């Protein structure tokens, strides 16, 4: 029996088109999904789109469409961007899919039956961009500190979820690492938030029409975060994959995942996820990415210009995973030229060209031994360090070739040159093996070139 490995990403709001921030997370999750599959696990990799709520309703209105029509168009953009980036998801959950809606209603009914939902009235503030209720201390002079927009004052009938009952249990689960929160600094952040005491949270809204009706009171729709979080349970066709091994999300939505989500699971009597990892935020040329600044970067455009694997490589090599990072096209261009074209591409080209000259066959290359250091870095989500480790040998081979003047040696001492080349072919095969989860197409191309001895430029000059 294979080990199960269930990995999820956040499901993206469809109010706008996908950008590199969304892409960054999906690429990282994809590396893990591919890695665990290659290690022989039965992997379920789930992503999707979050399509209800006020934010999406207003975006639809802005373009003169009804929400149902709008979300269909938008969701396709996400799916197609992920295909463009070679994201090997197994499940794509759309929260407007009838199957998801039905299951959300079933879960809510269970929570209600468990006595954890009660009727009340919410009066306070709400940030539509976050789709989040804001207390006084979560605002700056009435503004959302994240979106720099005024929070809206709302007052409506809602149903509440008894979140306040779960603080101690959640704290315990986090402290004991029963549910790991990483990086460590984020774990401490969550613990200190819980330490201040948890308040009950609304599970429904009456002023928002675009949502899943509560099964016991059709005048309410499900609060969009309850609808969205439940995707982790509604998506898989069987329960075999629960608990999830990893929820990969951005740092901005950690509280929903590390506080509300475990409480929902506890109210349902279900196990908690094994790990939640909150990655950092990408800025663009030093600025927050925003529609109003006009600096939103479309991953499709980058793929078109630099290739899928170059974008995947750049984002994970450039920024230590877990930290915030900055994207700029000039840095992508520079790494494309140095790391990809000059180092990796050139190495493969030189070694294969010389091997062809001396008729060194790569067919009988030794089976590559896995580099356990790289594996362990990937398992710890230290992607940039794993890539640096892979590149160490790429750089070492290039330096050796320069030092031994291999292109001369091929003429002056064929036997010696052959020995070198055999060794390089083997090491390049290992590089390709280790690169597979990060750059699947490139790794395949290298392996194919090694097999048939045909050279092809991997990263054409831009
Ligand atoms: N719909 C919610 C998530 C529900 S999960 C049950 C949401 N959507 S989002 O579209 O705003 O964000 C989706 C993911 O993209 C989040 O994990 C978020 O952190 C991430 N990012 C959005 N902008 C980002 C950057 N600029 N940089 C890195 N990640 C970013 O939140």
Image (cartoon, grey):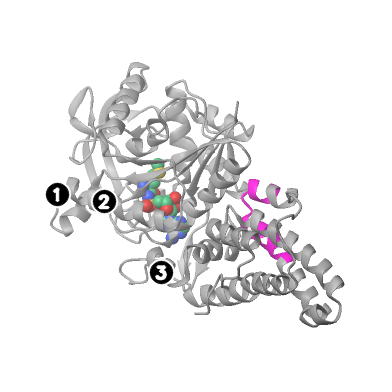
- Disc 3 versus disc 2: distance between alpha carbons? 30 Å
State whether residue 345 is above or below residue 170.
below
- Disc 2 versus disc 1: distance between alpha carbons? 13 Å
Which quarter of the picture shows residue 264? top left
Residue 442 within the magenta-colored segment of the rendering? no
Per the rendered image, the range of residues in magenta is 376-393
Task: Provide the residue designation for mark 2.
Answer: 55
Name the residue at 39% across, 34% down.
235
Name the residue at 27% across, 28% down.
102
Name the residue at 80% across, 83% down.
408
Q: Which mark is residue 16?
A: none
Task: Provide the residue designation for mark 3.
Answer: 304
Residue 380 within the magenta-colored segment of the rendering? yes
Q: Is residue 49 left or right of residue 264?
A: left
Q: Considering the whole magenta stretch, tell me its main secondary structure.
A: helix
Q: Which mark is residue 66?
A: 1
Q: Residues within 10 Å of mark 3 (few under 14, many from 20)?
A: few
């Amino acid at each position: 029996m294979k080990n199960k490995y269930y990995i999820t990403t956040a499901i993206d709001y469809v109010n706008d088109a996908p950008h590199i921030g969304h892409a960054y997370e999906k690429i990282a999750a994809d590396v893990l999904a591919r890695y665990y599959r290659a290690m022989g696990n039965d992997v379920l990799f789930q992503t999707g789109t979050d399509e209800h709520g006020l934010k999406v309703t207003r975006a639809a209105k802005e373009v003169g469409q009804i929400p149902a029509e709008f979300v269909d168009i938008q969701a396709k953009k996400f799916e197609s961007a992920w295909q463009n980036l070679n994201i090997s998801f197994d499940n794509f959950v759309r929260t407007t899919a009838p199957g998801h809606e039905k299951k959300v209603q079933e879960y809510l009914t269970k929570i209600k039956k468990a006595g954890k939902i009660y009727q009340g009235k919410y009066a306070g503030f709400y940030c539509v961009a976050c789709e989040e209720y804001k207390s006084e201390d979560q605002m700056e002079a009435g503004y959302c500190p994240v979106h720099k927009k005024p929070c809206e004052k709302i007052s409506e009938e809602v149903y509440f979820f008894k979140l306040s009952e779960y603080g101690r249990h959640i704290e315990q689960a986090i402290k004991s690492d029963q549910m790991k929160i990483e990086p460590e600094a984020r774990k401490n952040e969550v613990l200190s938030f819980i330490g201040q005491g948890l308040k009950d949270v609304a599970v429904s809204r009456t002023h928002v029409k675009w949502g899943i009706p509560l099964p016991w009171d059709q005048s309410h729709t499900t609060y969009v975060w309850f609808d969205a979080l439940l995707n982790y349970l509604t998506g898989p066709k069987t329960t075999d994959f629960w608990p999830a091994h990893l929820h990969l999300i951005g740092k901005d939505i950690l509280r929903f995942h590390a506080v509300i989500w475990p409480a929902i699971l506890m109210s349902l009597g279900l196990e908690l996820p094994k790990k939640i990892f909150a990655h950092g935020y990408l800025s663009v040329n030093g600025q927050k990415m925003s529609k109003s600044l006009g600096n939103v970067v479309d991953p499709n455009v980058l793929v078109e210009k630099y290739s899928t694997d170059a974008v995947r490589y750049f984002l994970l090599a450039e920024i230590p995973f877990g930290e915030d990072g900055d994207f700029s096209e000039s840095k992508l261009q520079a790494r494309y030229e140095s790391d990809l074209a000059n180092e990796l591409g050139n190495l493969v080209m030189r070694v294969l060209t010389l091997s062809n000259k001396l008729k060194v066959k790569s067919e009988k290359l030794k089976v590559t031994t896995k580099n356990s250091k790289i594996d362990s870095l990937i398992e710890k989500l230290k992607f940039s360090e794993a890539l640096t480790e892979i590149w160490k040998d790429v750089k070492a081979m290039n330096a050796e070739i320069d030092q031994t003047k291999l292109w001369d040696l091929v003429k002056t001492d064929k036997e010696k040159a052959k020995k070198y080349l055999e060794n390089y072919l083997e090491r390049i095969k290992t590089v390709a093996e280790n690169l597979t989860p990060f750059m699947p197409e490139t790794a395949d191309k290298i392996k194919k070139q090694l097999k048939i001895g045909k050279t092809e430029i991997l990263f054409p000059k831009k």
